[in-house]
Image (cartoon, helix red, strand yellow):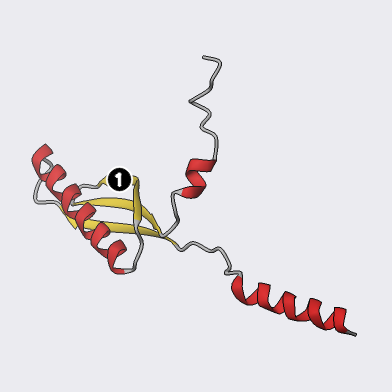
């Protein structure tokens, strides 16, 4: 009777101590109005959309962001970004197909 009790207690301890691995991933689309279609106005609108998206990601506790795409419309710029709270450990452990030792 002691062995099943010990196994049950050990299993419960492991379940309590083991934290589930989950990462939050959010996709942002930020739209900024364009004054005109000049290159300077587009760059300024993209910079503003980028800063707004990064502030939003940081406010939600997401530490990593990447640009997922951008569109220039006649009257606005739309910037899509993906933000996550994932660690770098997963990326470091994955082999990089571009860095092969036989080259």
Q: Which residue lies furthest to the right in this view?
A: 1
In this view, the residue in front, 1 or 64, is: 1
Q: Where is residue 75 in the image (x, y as percent from the top left)?
A: 18, 51
Q: Residue furthest top?
A: 103
User: 85 above or below 66?
Assistant: below
Residue located at (61% from left, 69% from top): 18
Residue located at (32% from left, 57% from top): 29
Residue located at (48% from left, 49% from top): 89
Q: Where is residue 16 in the image (x, y as percent from the top left)?
A: 62, 77
Q: Name the residue under label 1.
A: 70
Across the whole image, how many numbered discs are drawn on residues? 1
For numbered disc 1, what is the local secondary structure? strand
Give the quarter of the figure containing the N terminus. Answer: bottom right
User: 83 above or below 96?
Assistant: below
Residue located at (45% from left, 56% from top): 86
In this view, the residue in front, 7 or 89, is: 7
User: 90 above or below 98?
Assistant: below
Q: Dot 1 surroundings within 10 Å: few (below 14), some, or many (20 or more)?
A: some
In the picture provided, is 13 more to the left or to the right than 2? left
Q: Where is residue 24 in the image (x, y as percent from the top left)?
A: 46, 63
In the picture provided, is 40 more to the left or to the right than 69? left
In the picture provided, is 99 more to the left or to the right than 81? right
In this view, the residue in front, 22 or 38, is: 22
In the picture provided, is 46 more to the left or to the right than 79? left
Q: Position of residue 40 (x, y in %)?
A: 9, 40
């Amino acid at each position: 009777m002691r062995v099943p009790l010990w196994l049950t207690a050990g299993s419960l301890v492991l379940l309590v101590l083991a934290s589930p691995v989950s990462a939050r991933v959010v996709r942002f689309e930020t739209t900024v109005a364009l004054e005109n279609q000049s290159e300077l106005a587009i760059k300024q609108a993209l910079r503003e959309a980028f800063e707004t998206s990064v502030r939003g990601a940081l406010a939600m506790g997401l530490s990593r962001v990447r640009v997922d795409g951008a569109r220039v419309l006649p009257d606005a710029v739309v910037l899509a970004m993906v933000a996550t709270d994932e660690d770098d450990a997963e990326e470091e452990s994955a082999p990089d197909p571009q860095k092969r030792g036989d080259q």
